[in-house]
Image (cartoon, grey):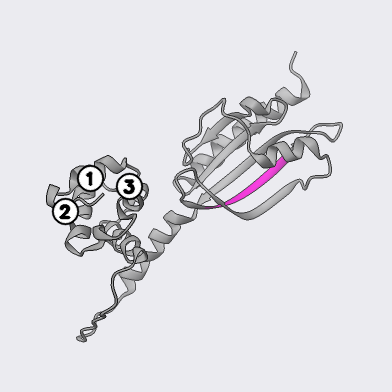
Amino acid sequence: MMTESDILLREGTKIVEALGKTLAPLVEVVLHDLTRPEHGIVAISNNLSGRQVGDPTTEIGLARMSDPGYPDVLQNYANRFPDGRPAKSTSIGLRNGEGRYVAAICLNVDTGMLGAMATCLQQLAETSAAVVHETLAPPRIDALRGALEQFAAARNTTPRGLSALQRRQAVLELADKGLMELKNSHGMVADMLGIARSTVYSYLPKERIRV
């Protein structure tokens, strides 16, 4: 016979699957079983964080378990995915008939992807003027991020949505602009493209690799 907690998790799984499919590709939806936090994740839809069913619950889930007075809803708080991408999260606690937290549904919005879309829309609305601008300031690491997002936006996608050939082209274009000479550039490009740093190195001619 199913317990009340089992029923809540069963119904919560339906909600997670529906929301994940509806809000893809921008929002990850996760269901946590707070009665067994060491293996708390029981459902995950539109997986953006790389977590798996059976992974432990988060700090907020643990806080709910230890404090019955913890807020039912935490909305729109700043967060980050494991690879450093910025996120906006909302956590909804589910209580049983006795008022104890037994589960939580969490939504994690990939705000980095939204930023890439905003760049794409900005490019679409841009007009060109016959004026040349020049700066003598050295390129900064944020210029690298912007250049990679513009490369992807010009192809109607995000950096992580680029094909293997497009990723190679992007890295070579960044190198031609001198942006791969910047400190930590290889790590940032690897994170933005969702690939290993060694793969970034493999895209570059040997004479351009700087460790």
Instruction: Kindly identify which numbered label has been placed on residue 201.
Output: 1
Q: Amino acid at mark 3?
A: Ala
The secondary structure type at the circle numbered 3 is helix
In this picture, is 87 found above or below 125?
Answer: above
Of callouts 2 and 3, which one flags the residue occurring earlier in the amino acid sequence? 3
Which residue does the image show at 26% across and 49% down from the upper left?
211
Magenta span contains residue 53: no
Range drawn in magenta: 87-93
Q: CA distance from mark 1 to mark 2?
A: 9 Å
Which residue is more in the foreground, 182 or 110? Answer: 182
Q: Position of residue 160 (x, y in %)?
A: 34, 47
Q: What residue is disc 3 on?
A: 190
Instruction: Classify the position of the N terminus by image quarter.
Output: top right
The secondary structure type at the circle numbered 2 is helix
Q: Position of residue 175 (x, y in %)?
A: 20, 58
Question: In the image, 198: left or right of 88?
Answer: left
Which residue is more in the foreground, 60 or 102? Answer: 60
Which quadrant of the structure image shows residue 154?
A: bottom left
Q: CA distance from mark 3 to mark 1?
A: 9 Å
Q: Nearer the viewer, mark 3 or mark 1?
A: 1
Q: Amino acid at mark 1?
A: Tyr
Question: In the image, 43: left or right of 149?
Answer: right
Counting other residues with Cα less than 10 Å from the Cα at mark 1, is it few (<14), some (14-19), or many (20 or more)?
Answer: some
Counting other residues with Cα less than 10 Å from the Cα at mark 3, is it few (<14), some (14-19), or many (20 or more)?
Answer: many
Determine the main secondary structure of the stretch shown in magenta: strand
Q: Amino acid at mark 2?
A: Arg
Which residue does the image show at 63% across and 29% down from the upper left?
40
